[in-house]
Amino acid sequence: MTLIAVAVLVVALTLFFTLTIRTKDLPPPEPVSPTQYLEDRKAQIYENLRDLQFEYRVGKLSDEDYQQTKLGLQKELAGVLGEIEKFGVPKVQAPQEKPPANVCPHCSAKFPKPMKFCGECGKAMA
């Protein structure tokens, strides 16, 4: 009897919270990339190429079937990559160079090997 009461209470609370969610409490949706579909298709083609190569190595495909299917997938991939390039490639910032781990960024003291803390000023070498 108690188990049934608990089950009814859980269902009632679940329905209550589900039906009373305010739209302002929901997080904003992530912006959809204009190339997301193309990126997904590119990943699928790469996966298909890997599967095709595996099946060929196992011996499930003849050499002629393998070459025809591979060529078709490669042409489709080239088309998808061309469409992605039409949208423009986002520019990647060059990574900033880190100072060597054996030079203190605070006092510029140099040490023969990397250390966690500076032997001169005592501050972290990170």
Image (cartoon, helix red, strand yellow):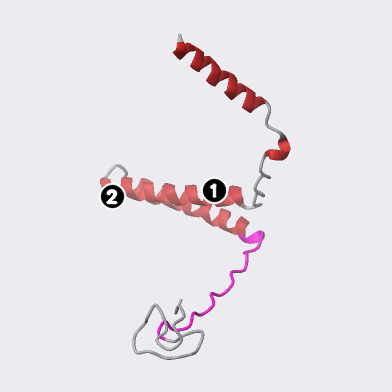
Specify the segment rendered in magenta: 85-102
What secondary structure is marked by label 2? helix
Could you tell me which residue is drawn at 65 percent across and 63 percent down?
88
Q: Residue furthest left?
A: 58
Q: Secondary structure at mark 1?
A: helix
Return the mark for residue 97.
Answer: none
Question: Given the image, on which type of amino acid does mark 2 rest?
Answer: Arg
Q: Which residue is mark 1?
A: 40
Pointer 2 residue: 57
Magenta residue check for 98? yes
Percent across and percent down for residue 115 are 37, 81
Q: Residue 95's x, y, as percent?
A: 53, 74
Labels 2 and 1: the sequence-earlier one: 1
Q: 66 or 115: which is nearer to us? A: 115
**Quick one: quadrant of the N terminus?**
top left
> Badge 1 local density, few (<14 within 10 Å), some, or many (20+)?
few
